[in-house]
Amino acid sequence: MSKYVFTGFSKCLYREQKFKSEAERVLSIILEGDAIKWFKPARGQFQIYYKWNGDYLEYQPDFVAETEDIIYMLEPKNRDEINHPQVLAKKDVAVQWCQYASEYMLKHNGKPWIYVLIPHDAIAQNITVQGLGDRFKTNGYSTKNN
């Protein structure tokens, strides 16, 4: 799948996208319908690092999407990888980053950030970003507060 370039996005910050999986491509369709804007971050854009095998490695989330009330950091993964120690190490630093970002943004009239780790087989065109967030969020902010 990663050899194909997809176009036709109106809410993505970039006109062309490559996806690693069909789940990522379907998630982009959901984001096109629900998000105000979305993008796939470039390497170094967030500078989030996790410790793995004694080294600090950069974590780059797959998607970031802004809705009316929330900014989502979204990570689709194969269901059999969700509990892999490296995926959990990335999740832990991303959740911490989202908590810090939320604290800052809420003090400055911004939106909270939520990290969402999504099993690939839960991604379908008939679900919303908020539905994915409510079901698979990994930090304490509840989308039902809004």
Image: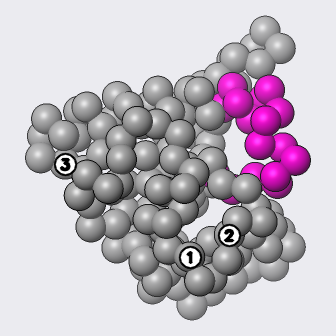
Is 122 above or below relative to 91? below
Q: Residue at x 82, y 54 (%)?
A: 78
Q: Residue at x 50, y 74 (%)?
A: 128
Q: Is residue 136 visible?
A: yes
Residue 22 location (% of width, % of height)? 79, 73
Amino acid found under the numbered disc labelled 2: Ile
How many numbered circles are shown? 3
Is 10 above or below relative to 24? below
Labels 1 and 3 touching (C-beta < 8 A): no
Q: Nearer the viewer, residue 25 or 69?
A: 69
Labels 2 and 1 touching (C-beta < 8 A): yes
Residue 18 location (% of width, % of height)? 72, 70
Q: Residue at x 54, y 62 (%)?
A: 132
Range shown magenta: 75-90
CA gap between label 2 and label 3 equals 28 Å
**Where on the picture, by quarter, is residue 72?**
bottom left
Q: Is residue 3 visible?
A: no
Furthest residue to the bottom?
A: 8
Q: Tell me the tag on residue 100.
A: none
Q: Secondary structure at mark 2?
A: loop
Residue 83 location (% of width, % of height)? 79, 35
Residue tagged by mark 2?
Answer: 123
Residue 144 location (% of width, % of height)? 32, 56
Q: Secondary structure at mark 3?
A: loop
Residue tagged by mark 3?
Answer: 110
Quarter of the picture containing the C terminus is: bottom left
